[in-house]
Image (spheres, helix red, strand yellow):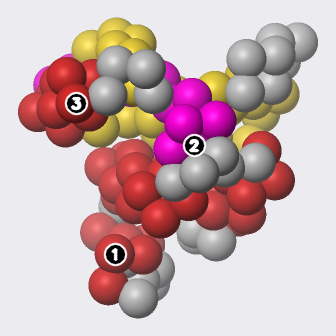
């Protein structure tokens, strides 16, 4: 059930125009200057942009895997514990986070993992 950090990076690398930044404690991921995700190696968790309704549903359904991180601009960011999530589900969440930040022309270039 656990997803490795390398698996998460492969998911991010499959997307278009991803910009990466590293700080002392985490890595961040953006598309055309708009953040969609974070990775914290110390805790093996990722933070992903989601719709508020999705954030609330994930946290309510499995609070041992998902945590509310914060809300901003109508979006809810969710912390995902890699040890508790399946690869297919994480892939969909990563794509959705990227899709919510990417311009439409980029979204059209990348197939939705749920439809593969």
Quadrant in which the C terminus appears: bottom left
**Which residue is more in the foreground, 33 or 84?**
84
Q: Secondary structure at mark 1?
A: helix
Instruction: Classify residue 103 as left or right of residue 58.
Output: right
Q: Secondary structure at mark 3?
A: helix
Instruction: Residue at 45% x, 35% y: name it.
Output: 48
Instruction: Classify residue 33 as left or right of residue 9.
Output: left
- Judge whether residue 79 is colored magenta: yes
Q: Which residue is mark 2?
A: 30
Q: Is residue 11 above or below residue 37?
A: below
- Residue 61 shows which numbered tag? 3
**Contact check, label 3 and label 2, Cβ < 8 Å:** no
Q: Provide residue 16's location: percent of width, then percent of height.
A: 58, 69
Instruction: Residue at 51% x, 44% y: name it.
Output: 85
Q: Which residues are magenta?
A: 72-85
Q: Provide residue 78's location: percent of width, then percent of height.
A: 39, 25
Instruction: Residue at 67% x, 49% y: name it.
Output: 3
Q: CA distance from mark 2 to mark 1?
A: 21 Å
Mark positioned earlier in the residue sequence (2 or 1): 2
Query: Which dot, 3 or 1, sits closer to the camera?
Result: 3
Q: Provide residue 115's location: percent of width, then percent of height.
A: 32, 84
Query: Which dot, 3 or 2, sits closer to the camera?
Result: 3
Could you classify mark 3 by the number of other residues whose Cα lies within 10 Å: few (under 14), some (14-19), or many (20 or more)? few
């Amino acid at each position: 059930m656990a997803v490795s950090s390398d698996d998460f990076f492969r998911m991010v690398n499959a997307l278009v125009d991803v910009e990466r930044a590293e700080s002392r404690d985490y890595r961040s991921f953006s598309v055309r200057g708009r953040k969609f995700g974070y990775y914290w190696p110390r805790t093996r968790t990722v933070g992903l942009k989601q719709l508020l309704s999705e954030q609330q549903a994930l946290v309510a359904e499995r609070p041992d895997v998902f945590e509310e991180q914060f809300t901003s601009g109508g979006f809810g960011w969710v912390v995902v514990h890699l040890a508790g999530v399946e690869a297919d589900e994480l892939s969909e969440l990563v794509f959705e986070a990227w899709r919510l930040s990417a311009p439409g022309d980029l979204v059209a270039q990348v197939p939705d993992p749920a439809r593969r």
